[in-house]
Image (cartoon, rainbow, N blue to C red):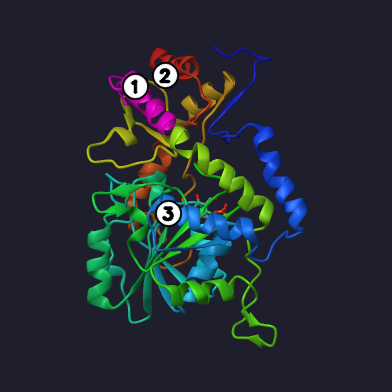
Amino acid sequence: MKSPGHTPIYVTQPYMPPLEDFIPYLEKIWDSRRLTNHGPMHEHLEEALAEYLGVEHIALFSNGTLALVTALQALRITGEVITTPYSFIATAHSLRWNGIEPVFVDIDPLTLNLDPTKIEAAITPKTTAILPVHCYGNPCNVEAVQKIADTYNLKVIYDAAHAFGVRDAGGSILRHGDLSVLSFHATKVFTTFEGGAIVCPDKKTKARIDNLKNFGIVDETTVVAPGINGKMAEVNAAFGLLQLKHIDKALARRREIGAKYGELLKDVPGIECVQQREGNGTNFSYYPILVGQDYPLSRDALFERLREKGIHGRRYFYPLITEFPMYRGMPGASRSNLPVATKVATDVICLPIYPNLTDDEVENIAALIRGIQ
Ligand SMILES: Cc1ncc(COP(=O)(O)O)c(C=O)c1O
């Protein structure tokens, strides 16, 4: 096991292809002198990702947060939007950056995603959209969400920051809703250092998104909207093209690690592996465990014990978004309205998972968790 002086193990580590393989991409950029503004790497990556993911159109962004902000603008969302408190803070921030009021609804105890059975009660005349998150890459109940959206004429934007490569029986999970938003941040399964994307079903919406991410500029003399600078640069797109060559291997290794944790932790009283639940369709972007009453230590005590041994898990997502001062007073934010999310946030630890994590390391982490009396 890790002792002082050993390299710490963090919750994630980016998959880095061999450096020498990146040089030819850089040479091309140097030769072309195209650094940004829809250069050849950017165009190539959009095509390659649409094909790999099995989606119609994809618009690249400099990060996932700007993609979320722009997705809401592209659909002209206003008023109130129903969303989950159990996510990274950027989900709710993207609403505030558009002057939209988030309305928080509790999560489903099985999927840990927005609970569709609780959405209807939160709809008001000001509601215009639903913003669910495929948390940890576990698909939302997309059919139930769409049914409500159709009944009340609401748009659906999925925060799919964790859901790269996730599929259901009909194809990519990203085809659901009106738009899906990806993050390619360094901590994500597929990374471009910083980056993100909007997946959209039609050319017209893609053109609007492309304008909005480039200041609203249509041509030299036409600006149609107060757009932002959300463009992905060539160097990031080039890294994405190289990453894509390794992604199947990286996803397969995550699955292996997930299965190993599942096997090693399955009989530990008080520990539940969320990704081992029946019907779970995750890409193993995260490996959350829930530390229950039957475990000898509290969640926080286990978290600290692991840290002392150099194992840096993360309490994603704790605190809930609704615990932060800018969201505390918002509709639906009270703990009594969010019993499931409140409980899960106090029980969860995400264990380290990334392609270069070795079997020995996984075994050592699991042994440490099992060994506590
Ligand atoms: C659920 C979720 N939404 C949005 C984001 C924001 O993405 P980015 O960091 O690329 O801006 C992240 C991650 O960073 C995330 O985990």
Residue 63 x %, y %: 59, 57
Callout 2 touching callout 3 (CB < 8 Å):
no
Quarter of the C terminus within the rendering: top left
What residue range appears in magenta?
Answer: 252-270
Q: Amino acid at mark 2?
A: Ala
Considering the numbered disc 2 on the image, is that residue within a helix, a strand or a loop? Answer: helix
Considering the numbered disc 3 on the image, is that residue within a helix, a strand or a loop? Answer: helix
User: For mark 2, what is the residue?
Assistant: 366
Q: Residue at x 49, y 59 (%)?
A: 91
Depth-wise, is mark 1 or mark 3 nearer the camera?
A: 3
Q: Residue at x 23, y 49 (%)?
A: 169
Quarter of the N terminus within the rendering: top right
Q: Amino acid at mark 1?
A: Leu
Q: Residue at x 31, y 73 (%)?
A: 123
Q: Residue at x 45, y 20 (%)?
A: 362
Foreground: 302 or 87?
Answer: 87
Foreground: 212 or 258?
Answer: 212
Residue 117 x %, y %: 22, 60
